[in-house]
Amino acid sequence: MRSRADAQYEPKGGDADPPTQRSFESVTDRCAPKSGSMAEALGESAMRGPRSSAAPPSLEGTVPEARGHALRERGNMLLRRNDCASAARDYDEALALFRAAGDPLGQAQVLMDRGALRLREGVPVQAVRDYDEALALFQAAGDRAGEGDALRARGFARAEEGDLGGAVCDYDLAIQLFLQLGDREPLKPRADARKAPADSDGPGTLEQPRARPHGASHGRALKSRGDLRVRLRNLPGAARDYSTALALFQGAGDRSGQASVLKARGDMRLGQDNVTGAARDYDWALTLYQATEDHLGHASVLKARGDLRTRQGDLAGAERDYDQALELYTTTRDLLGQAAVLKARGDLRSQQEDLVDAVRDYDRALALFRSGFERRGQAATLKARGDLRRAQFELVAELVSVAAADASDLEDALSDYDQALALFEVLEDGAGQAGVLRARGDLARIQGDLGAALALYLGAKRLLEVAGNAPELSALLAEIARLHALAGRAAEARSAAEQSLARADRATSPECRELAEAVLSGRITASQEEGATRDSRVPSTPKRYERERY
């Protein structure tokens, strides 16, 4: 099962939200995506549509009445091209024009788009403010469908900032509102429609009320709530939301919406080890995204299927999926999508022991995550690169000796771990911190510093207990048991091994169980201590953990 850190930065599909600081939590939790896709959750115009390489249109000579709409459309184009600064300027100017004209719906629509921009920039607090204002404007104008969209978008933003209770409330209100509206509602005449002449017997040019489907909006609200329920581990509730959303999207003829639900349900099923169901959902989603020529959605599912194939051991198939996904993300200039695929391909190449190409992929991924200000992706990539460098050091240390190992590998690994730990602390990601501390503990054990290793393991243990990650905690307890055994503390070793087996579940690796059982059977003793002499070339323990050494 992937770590929480790995799953959190996965990009969402084209109908899904562009990646944000915290919208990458998947169900494997970690994956906890945290929130689902942005375009689904935030509305369509700003996030959907091709990423054109042409220059944005000039608005010179545009009449004032049309300038606000034109600025909004140009802002949406710029946002799709990741030019956030220029998009923000257009949105601000459009908002000022709509305010001067007293157009509440024009203001609300721009605020919705600017909220999506705020999320892209990683500032959900400001996005919530924009959605609050948009919601009030929609309510004042009597636009109930707009009100539902604003509630859904605000729920997404609240989830991004960690207000899960507020997010649940907003999603529930949005869903209830769409239920009240039904799937179809008469549209009011357009604001710019001309009235019939007073002496005319007919309707003149007055636009007749038409039917407006709300199934797709209702489906997006349910899909967003399903994503949140995955994060909250309410998987039966999430499955119900996804099934209902899928039916609504099918009824509305929204193939991109169907595909986004299938991708999310596939992620959930993969997190439940339902590989067959996940593969079926991914294949169906791929067919729909290809039919709609949604390159971003197509790329996101290829990346997910690559992850699945990696788990199945089909490394060649996984690499093909990653290569195709990378090509699509590059074509659409989605930097964070490219970064996520490069990180995954680096993991794959690390498994294949293609260390040079793995490091190259990690380096490229890290540069892209940094350019997109995606801290969670940076942290996960630094951790993975640190693991690779640590593995190189440990291989020589175990086959020859610690003294013979290359100190530069050790220094580089420690540097990566320190940077990753600092980022995970800022993000308040306990599982991510625990993963780094455990890796540092493993390295300290190889160096022969059992005291430092124990301090690091205990720090990781506390974080995993809070996070409630049973498989990771079981594996860590097995390592703690081995450490006590190596130090000659038989009672402590037995206690930790028993706790490890007690917390094991189906996600616990066979190696973890074997290690705990080896400790209990007395096959690991102090005479087998690794790293007879401590390598003092590089400190093995961060200063704040020194006081916890036994």
Image (spheres, rainbow, N blue to C red):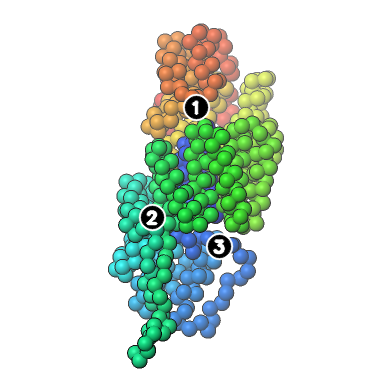
Mark drawn on residue 152: 2
**Snapshot quadrant of residue 460:** top left
Mark nearer the N terminus (3 vs 2): 3
Which residue is at the front of the view, 322 or 261?
Answer: 261
Going by the numbered disc 1, the residue's amino acid type is Ala
Q: Which residue is mark 3?
A: 49
Residue 478: tell me if it is visible: yes
Quote the CA–CA distance across marks 3 and 1: 40 Å
Taking the image as shown, residue 151 lies to the left or right of residue 521, namely: left
Mark 3 lies on a secondary structure that is loop
Compared to residue 233, the image places residue 194 above or below, namely below
Which residue lies at the image location 32% right of the left edge and 46% below the top edge?
165
Q: Can residue 372 be seen at all in this image of the molecule?
A: no
Residue sitting at x 52%, y 33%:
274
For the residue pair 433 and 242, the one nearer the viewer reads as 242
Location of the C terminus (image quadrant): top left
Relative depth, front residue between 493 and 326: 326
- Judged left or right of residue 127, residue 397 is right
- Circle on res. 465: none
Residue type (three-letter) at the residue carrying disc 2? Arg
Q: Which mark is residue 507?
A: 1
Looking at the image, is 43 positioned above or below residue 172?
below
Q: Tag 2's secondary structure?
A: helix
